[in-house]
Amino acid sequence: MCGLAACSGPGGTELLAGMLERMAHRGPDGRGRLRVGASELGHVRLAIVDVAGGAQPMTNERGELAVVMNGEIYNHLALRAGLEERHQFRTRSDTEVVLHLYEEQAEDMLPRLDGMFAMALAGPRGLLLARDPLGIKPLYYGRRGDILLAASELKAFPEMDELHMLPAGHARHGESPPWRFAAPFPVPRPLVDAPLDEVLTEVRRRLEEAVKKRLMSDVPVGVFLSGGVDSSLIAACMRPHMVRLHTFTAGMAGAPDLAAARDVAHFLGTEHHELIYDEQDVIEAIPEVIRALESFDAPLVRSAVPMYFLARLASRYVKVVLTGEGADELFAGYDYLATLGGGEGLRAELVAITLRLQDTNLQRGDRMTMVHGLEGRVPFLDQALVRYVSRLPAELIEPRPDRPGKWLLREACRGLLPAELLERRKLKFSEGAGSAEVVSRHARRLVSRAEFDEERMAAGDHPLRSREELYYFRIWREAFGARVPPALVGRTLDRTAAVEGR
């Protein structure tokens, strides 16, 4: 995990140093810069794989290609085995595998990468930018005069003439517009036709494999544990592979997540760590959370607050954590999905909300971990697991009155946890941590109804939806000013409640 920056064009070198400095939190273990032709690459490193030898930017044998990458390629050893006869490897890093694979296959290598990644690769053909199929790792680009700039975070950029998010599963080379190199869902989508017991076995096998591959690390790995079914199953799948498993929970005193996580940690025999924060801690953290998150979206900020404290706690013990993002989108865990009637309507909605993760929950997970120099990995968004589940008949996934949410996941994982833990009902992150009402109440104290009526269009075409969101927007605007257009901020679609407005 790290932060990357890249520039192409006259005068970009002078901007690159400032961009790296504004992302220093993403890479406390090292910093590097390198010019290749008309492009320059920069990198701040959080050392995870090949700690001693994996510094970036990294070049090929002849020095005419260089790459910086943020993320992990989980199949890098298999890819490396097919390259070693023709290339001289100097490191054990997954980044070097990407470099040599590009030498042989150019952009055709991108669909072969199994992992989470954003990269910038410089060579004779110009600058290539690419981002993983679900957008787990961030990448933005834009122009300032004749200079093309790219970086992992919005805060890295100076004032720009234009600024864009590179969409998930897309690449961009030189002056070409972005093109899609990989879709996370199979098209067309042939259905899996198998007995239920085979489906359950396959779902569990793929989840366990997704967890196992994400233990790839040369530094300690832990897990965020709320006590809900998603994070608890991740922890249960990790346990057989770990001599010492560190689990982490944060919340306000008496929060439901604290007690539930203790029960799971006790059952699994983990080394469990808690951080208990109070109302004043939350109020003081909100400005830093918003600056780190790069968003003013109210539901996202609300859930980012407990994750901010959770990541701060985990960073004291480990450098990598596994998290439960994606399970609700994959296995239909949200209550409102029960109103869609199943079938293709449900399937289309699950695809849509999964693709929106790149600028909502995945943005939260990336920024809240990276602000503390911590890498987050998301097993439920493993490409093989996502593609398999998306091909299952909708009736196996659709919410029904006679079975709990995420029924298929719970059934597939029977035996990993006691029934009372496996069947815990879903709580929103901020509700489980106990801080949801604190941040909402604080915002309403600071923003009057009259102010909201006057300023609700301050973010442009998308009206601010509550006094709470206006409060967050004011902090966001002070931090980013004119450097980031509000339209670039992803918005959570709250389909279960009307706009508060008052």
Image (spheres, helix red, strand yellow):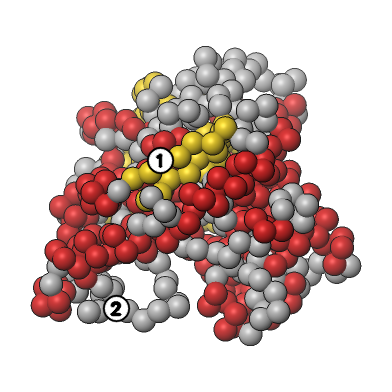
268 up-or-down from 201: above or below: above
The extreme front residue here reads: 254
The residue nearer to you, when weighing 471 against 44, is 471
Q: Amino acid at mark 1?
A: Leu
Quadrant including the C terminus: bottom left
214 up-or-down from 42: above or below: below
Please name the residue shown 26% across and 46% down the image.
281
Give the residue at mark 1.
Answer: 275
Please name the residue shown 73% across and 35% down the image.
240
Q: Does residue 83 show up?
A: yes
- Cα separation between marks 1 and 2: 31 Å
Please name the residue shown 66% across and 71% down the image.
404
Give the residue at mark 2.
Answer: 500
Q: SS of the residue at dot 2?
A: loop
Q: SS of the residue at dot 1?
A: strand
Q: Amino acid at mark 2?
A: Glu
Measuring from the top left, give residue 471's x and y in whole percent: 20, 62
Measuring from the top left, give residue 318's x and y in whole percent: 50, 29
Measuring from the top left, give residue 48's x and y in whole percent: 53, 26
Q: Is residue 264 left or right of residue 483?
A: right
